[in-house]
Structures are given as C-alpha cells and as structure tokens.
Amino acid sequence: MKLAILVDDPTCYGGIQQFSRDLAGMLGQDGISVELLAYSGALSGLKPCSARIVRLNEAEKRHGAVRLLRGGPRRYLSCGPLRLGALLGDIPQIRRKISEVLPGGDVLLINSFHSAHLFMPHEVLRNNRVIFVQHNSPEQLYHWRYDFGGWLRRQKIELFNRYVDALVTLSPREEMGLARYLRLDGKLVRVIRHQTNLPEITTLESGNPRDVLFLGRLTAQKRVDRILQVAAAAPQFHFHLCGDGPEEARLKRAAAGLTNVSFHGYVQEPAAWLRRAGIVIFTSDFEGYPIAGIEATAYGKPIVALHTFPAAADLVVDGKNGYLLEDFSPEGFAAALEEVVRNYPACCAGALAERDKFSGTVIHDAWRDLLRDLTEKEMGRK
C-alpha cells in the first residue's frame, strides 16, 4: 500500500507539517510506502524530514517577480494570499504530477480541502481512497478559506461529500459540529488525536509553577495580546513567549514596560522549555488540537486555556490538569493561574494521568486500523 499525504511544504514548521512528518515516520515503520506530496509558494528548508518528499512544484527554480513573491523560508510567517498567489501559475504542473504519482489503488490523505480543490484532478480522487484530516474546529473549517470557506464553498463541500471515504476527527467532541456542514453518512469517521514526538518522561519534570509558557507561532489567531493583558494583571508570574511570526514586532511594542514578559523567538528544543515551565497557557481565538498542549500534557504541565474550540475540553479536564475558562478576562486568567499554583502537585499528577490518550502506541494502532478498514471497504460509492 502507498499512502500519499498532500501538504504545504513539509520542511517548514507548523502543526500540519509536524503532523504529516510524524505520521509518515510512524507508518513507515509498518512497511507502508509513504510519500509527502509537497506544494509550496515559498522556498523550503527549515526542518529536516526523513520521509520521501515528492515535490509538485519547485519554488527555488523560479526567477524574477515570481521568485520575489515566493520569498524565502520566512514567507511562512507572512500572510497566506501571497503564498497562494505564487502558486497559481503552477496549478497545471501540480495536477499533472499528482496524476502521475497516484494513478489509482492507493490512499490519499488531505490536510487542507482548499488545496485538494485546487490541485486534485477528479480522477485521482475517484480512483484512490481518500482521507480528510480535521485540523481545525468545525466552525473554523466551514468559514476558513483554506478549507471550506470562500466563494467556492459549495463546490468544495460537494467534492468532500462525493469523494472522501474517511474522516479523521480531532476529538470525540467534533463529529456533531462537522455533521452540521458535511455529509458523513457512508464515511468511516474515526477519532485519532495528534501525538507528540518529544521523548516521553517517566517521572514528573520539576518546574517553577510561576513560570508560564506560551509555545507557538505569533499570529493573530493565537491572541498573544491577551497573554500580555494577563501578565499586566498577574505581576507575580513570569510569562515566557516561545515562537516567532508576523505579530512579533507589534507584540514586543505592546509589552514595553512589562518586566514579567520575555520573548525567546523560535526555539529548536521545546522540551527544554517544557521542563522549565510550570504552567502552559492558551488564549487563541480558535484552534484544532494544539500540539503544544499535547506536549505540555506529556511533560506533566498544567494548562490554563480559553474554551474557544471543541477539543479544548478534551485537552483540559477542568480542575484535573488545569482550568478551562469560558470567557476571557485578565483577572479570570490570573485567578486561574493562582488556583493552579495552590493545587500544583495535583494538577501535575492530573496532567500525567491524561497522557495515555496521546500514547504513540494507541495512535499508531488507530491509524493502522483505519488504513486496514479503508482498504477493505468497497469503492462502489465512487
């Protein structure tokens, strides 16, 4: 069996890129031939990737204005329309390459339905088994232009309903929301959480409970400005912001005068920061299932998060491994952080108790079962 994963350049960083690399490495252990079908509107090369990459277009060979549009690796920290615009001229080439790579009888995994609508010939979708992996909340998937949003929403949803054989959801809390927008009858629907590739720990990592960690890209979605408001309301805590992105300069200006906030940029070794930190914080407008939250759980770190996405309640069991806030207020977050400190040993133990659902063995078995069931399924619907 061959599994082909369609992904924006897997050598760049991001949750979908990490998921694709991890899945390729995991299933490659089973003797499955895994290929990452890489499309890109930017130059590549930030992250090593051991899986086989099939480059559908080659940004580094472009010249002149098109090369300028593609920028460099840091283009991934800029807005999406420039990246997408740089790809438009490559669509015929990408579609031809995909048809050569997937003539039929294999499995195709789609991370973004907008990219499938742009790049996937219908005969490829018809002649192969198709898995769509949910990477965002149902509401955001419906509205976000890189999945089902935008003026082509009807065509993209029709494509999903007609050709997708299996849907992988992020948590048990997602299916009802997805069914509101997509037809799920006749499809294999499985809950397979993401995993972390950080080394597992066997004992609790000691950390300073008053060191609060944010680990992620500095984008508008992450609402790190809210963390700065919490920092102003909770001067007894120190907030460590690990990551870079288009919001970095603005956030640094906003943090001027906050002596309990430190910016550390992109970190190569998140494990070191997870060992040092006491609490991990999320204040995003929306998420899918943040890998940084899984990493925090793997290291026994309590989480204080805003309940703005369904999987938040799967990640944070309120009062066990942290606290989940329904509405944002700096004072509410400051109080929740103090509550974690008061109950720190119990919250850490609660985080360690939640690790089993992110076990590499559990997730590996779930993917093996899905691929087995998918290959046994009749293709009569198509």
Image: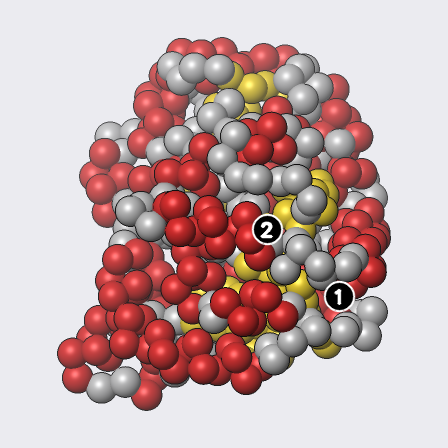
Residue 294 % position (x, y)? 64, 41
Report whether 251 appears left or right of 51: left
Q: Nearer the viewer, residue 197 or 288?
A: 288
* Up/down of 218 relative to 223, above or below: below
The amino acid type, in three-letter code, at marker 2 is Val
Q: Residue at x 60, y 77 (%)?
A: 102
| Element type at mark 1 | helix
First along the sequence among labels 1 and 2: 1
Report whether 353 appears left or right of 242: right
Q: Residue at x 66, y 15 (%)?
A: 319
User: What residue does disc 2 label?
Assistant: 133
Q: Nearer the viewer, residue 268 or 180?
A: 180
Residue 113 % position (x, y)? 47, 54
Q: Can residue 223 be seen in the rendering of this structure?
A: yes
Q: Quadrant of residue 376?
A: bottom right
The amino acid type, in three-letter code, at marker 1 is Leu
User: What residue does disc 1 label?
Assistant: 27
Q: Can residue 344 be seen in the rendering of this structure?
A: no
Residue 273 % position (x, y)? 56, 46
Q: Nearer the viewer, residue 85 or 286?
A: 85
Q: Nearer the viewer, residue 75 or 100?
A: 100
Are circles 1 and 2 on residues that touch, CB within 8 Å? no
Q: Quadrant of the N terminus?
A: bottom right
Binning the other alpha carbons within 10 Å of mark 1 as few (below 14), some (14 to 19) or many (20 upward) gives some
Residue 106 % position (x, y)? 69, 72
> Viewer-nearest of labels 1 and 2?
2
| Element type at mark 2 | strand
Q: Residue at x 31, y 31 (%)?
A: 225
The residues bearing labels 1 and 2 have C-alpha atoms spaced at a distance of 16 Å
